[in-house]
Amino acid sequence: MKNEKNQYIEHSQKQVLVIAIDDLDMNLDHGFDTLEAIHRYLMMKDVIVFISVDYEQLLNLSKVHFGKIYKDLGERDSNIRDQISDMSQLYLEKVIPLYKRVYTGALNFEGNQNIKVKNLDKKLKIKNYVFEKIYQKTGILFDLNGKKTHFYEPENIRKLKYMNMFFDYLGDETIEGYPEENYNEMLNDFSQRFVGDKLEYEEKKEMQKIMNSNLHRGVEELFDYLIRCISQKDGQEIEDLLRYKKERTQTLNLMYKLEEQKYDYGTLLHLIYIYGRLGDKEKRMVHCILAYYTIRLSKIYYSKESDSIRNKELIDFCAGSISGNLTNYMLPNVVYATTLKNSDKDINYRKSKMSGYIELSGTGEDWVQLNIEISPDDKENTILEFIRNIEICLLFFTTKDRENSKLEISIIDIGETQLGETKKFAINLEIRSNDKLYFCPWGFVVNSIQYLDILGKIEKDIKERMDGIDCDKWLLKDYEQWDKQYGHFALPIWDFDLMYNVEKRLIKEENEVIGIENIQELIGKISHIYEKCEDILNKQDESMEGKTNLGEIFRNCPAVKYFGENNFTAVFGTIWMHAINRETDLSKGIINFYEEEIQER
């Protein structure tokens, strides 16, 4: 025994015998009989029996023993099972009294959050230590800022020790093959250890099927699996399982609209979110899904392939949108102006959610004509500002087709018109896509990855048609600088776990109702979403002690940086009104329907 000064403590000359016993709870055949034999030594003077054991497993051994007493009584009813349980509990309390135990609680127990792990010259919390080691070895990032214990944290000291051995096994940066070899080892560890610990047989079989397929086929199988699981629940089951009205509404919405669901990144996140609310078994499957795609997509992002190949794989995985119909639960309720004439009670009851997806154009050729008055004294700057605002605005439109997610914008006609004494500058735009185009607040994320194809074409068209315009002041130059400094990704879409939690934290109850023509207020609400998103990313950066700069990358993305500035409102309003005035029944869109419709069903 040593004291705090590392000096041996002088005890009396009396000696004791210490008997150390391990793995008693793993002796399924003779564990109880051994415990009986040990019990007599517990009564002996000057003998200390030191047993390392899982108490729950020891309780199970006792239940098996006392259950044999009732084996001739035929079928065991619940009363007999309770007697066996009580007898086992009483026996263990007699053999191993509570005051004689030394507890080594689970690491995820709230009271043990003060446990630190020494890493070089720092002492870190368990979560920070584990995730910093993972990031150091692979670049893979998990969400560090949830209030609950993260699913990737070890449950006890033994698992922490094994995890640390795994980190030591992974190659260092100086070794050839890093980090791709480490990704493969992470995937092996995930499929062998993580899935084995988390899932039961049926879920494990589904997970193996997803992992054994290529990326696109696997995510389609996952999409179908989640829809099947949610569809099996009837309305009353959902009511019983989910605590909050909002969660019930979302789930019922999905149940009634599943036949219309089409895969994209955001809709997948939405399905995972709802699926995870159905029970503890589903939560464990969600943990596996989030871990698997975080590792798999990170491997693509950090691979040695060219930017174009890596970006295409990630864009294809997004299938046009990283938010999809999940956006509807972030934005305020948007209603037609005629609805606003009704009472507040009627407005709040109706809750017409139309903001997540607003259709701009179909699969045919659609023209959007935008007009702006020109100041004769500052013609060039007025035109430049207008062009920039058009470009920013159009970056927020997306498709829902994986194979045709690229947005193509062309200038058809450009020039001045004279209306009476007023001079106007007119641009005719053609927006092309093989799939329908929709407005979406997160649309700029995928479009920013392929900014060169989108902005390069429109600026080339304008340059050819207008002499003397300084193209250096257009949006493409800002994107080139942003790309050079930060890369193509405004959000870390390869970090599936973090993106899931970003989306989840942005979902909140919106009690406000705004008119569909109130463009300024709508822009303000969307800007607020971006501010909250940046806060979430900044917290992740802080937790990583400056090793990442996700918040800065997002904040400086030109689409976010210039959103809503200058004359943007006028341009956005023109395109927005064009979108919502199309002959489209928005109440029958992807999930754009009224809450009372669900209640009637």
Image (cartoon, rainbow, N blue to C red):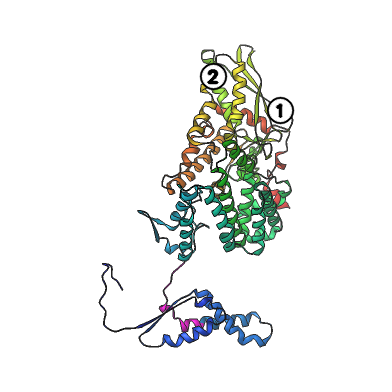
Q: Is residue 422 above or below residue 493?
A: above
Q: Residue at x 68, y 36 (%)?
A: 404
User: Tag 2, which secondary structure?
Assistant: helix
Q: Is residue 283 above or below residue 513?
A: below
What amino acid is at disc 2?
Answer: Thr
Q: Quadrant of residue 313?
A: top right
Magenta region: 90-105
Q: Residue 284 or 567: which is nearer the viewer?
A: 284
Residue lying furthest top: 421
Is 435 magenta? The answer is: no
Q: Are marks 1 and 2 in contact (CB under 8 Å)?
A: no
Q: How many badges with numbers are in the image?
A: 2
Determine which of the numbered discs, if any, sits on residue 13 in the image.
Answer: none
Determine which of the numbered discs, if any, sits on residue 382 in the image.
Answer: 2
* 229 relative to 82 in the view: left or right: right
Residue 601, percent from left and from top: 73, 53
Residue 276, percent from left and from top: 61, 56
* 289 relative to 588 in the view: left or right: left
* Quadrant for the N terminus in the image: bottom left
Mark 2, other Cα within 10 Å: few <14 / some 14–19 / many ≥20: some
Q: Is residue 198 above or below residue 11?
A: above
User: Which residue is disc 1 drawn over?
Assistant: 366
Q: Residue 373 or 342: which is nearer the viewer?
A: 373
What amino acid is at disc 1?
Answer: Asp
Residue 230, percent from left and from top: 68, 55
Residue 530, percent from left and from top: 52, 39
